[in-house]
Amino acid sequence: MSKVVPWLHVYVFSYNRGDFLANCIASIQRHLTNVAVWVVDDRSDDADTQTYLRDLPNGIGLLQSQAQESSRHGGLYNNMQLALEHAAGKGAELALFLQDDMQVVRDVAADDQANVEGFFAHFTNTAFLNPLFLKGMRKRRDQRITQLAEDYPVYFRHYPEKANPRGISYADAMIAHVPRLSEANWQFANGETVNAEQADKLFGKMGMMLHPFAMFLPEVPVFRGKKKSWAVAKAEQLRGTKPNRFFGMTGRQITALKERDVATVLPVAEDFLVTERDAKRPFTYSQINVYPWLRVIHKISQKLAK
């Protein structure tokens, strides 16, 4: 029997969030078929994550960065380059880059695959497609800047007053066209804005799926350093440290997503996704931001620590 070639290579970038990583991987296995999946770990050193990495589910590969970095993003961009080169070495055409605090929220069907592949076939100079739902906190802005393409079922953002193309030409979570990046000698830079600037020059605007299938989890404990401020620890005490997962979308919910008037109704997460536990609305994606007073205390403590 001939081996089935994966239509999509999936890379999940991980650091010290074992529960979140496990949820992300489980969601991929539940909703995506005929894909190849790797965890790209930034040398996690907490016990829970190390335990999970030692016993990954069957079929999940592991790539580990060569050196841990202490910047705000850790070694994310070096690890993204590692993943890109790995995908190129595997002969992959399309690679999905996700982070461990994200979740695939619905079944990705044959029509979704055809739409993704068709997008890159139609827009032959484009290298990035965004598969995420939109954030409710930016709904008014997105309603103004997100426009349906005339000749293909996809959105593009038109935001001429914005100073940089972050979120318009590039985002850290995306589907990438591997050969086009390789042909352009793409190198991930250390920052989303810088990557957006080079993406804009090389490839133009990033597409945005009409019917997205993944999203950030809300209210994630986000702290890379060894020590937590009092405010960060308090936010974790109040909201917990376990993932607030999305329920997988039902067939009826997927139908509502795909049969809506895409020209006027954007795919905003809060309008289509349901969390297992109560979450502040519109969703906030860093736990400290749930409590403005704790955020102020955290910012003050950061300044005093410098």
Image (tube, grey):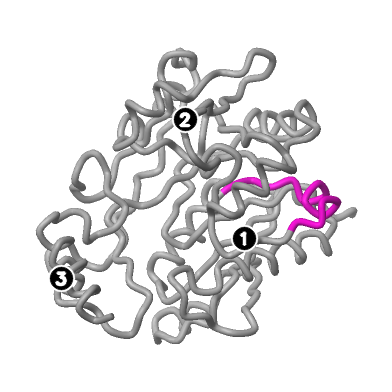
**Relative to 50, is 19 above or below?**
above
The residue carrying pointer 3 sits among few (fewer than 14), some (14 to 19) or many (20 or more) residues within 10 Å by Cα, namely: some
CA–CA distance between discs 1 and 3? 32 Å
Q: Foreground residue, 97 or 164? A: 164
Of the numbered discs 1 and 3, the one sitting upstream in the chain is 1
Residue under the point 53% across and 54% down: 192
Q: What segment carries the magenta color?
A: 174-186
**Real-space Cα separation, disc 1 to disc 2, in angstroms:** 33 Å
Quadrant of the snapshot with the N terminus:
bottom right
Q: CA distance from mark 2 to mark 3?
A: 35 Å
Direction from residue 207 to residue 107 in the image, left or right: left
- Name the residue rendered at 28%, 80% in the picture: 306
Residue 83, horizontal then vertical, whole percent: 69, 65
Residue 11 is marked as 1
The x, y position of residue 113, in whole percent, is 67, 35
Q: Which residue is mark 3?
A: 231
Labels 1 and 2: the sequence-earlier one: 1
Q: Earlier in the sequence, mark 2 or mark 3?
A: 2
Q: Amino acid at mark 2?
A: Glu
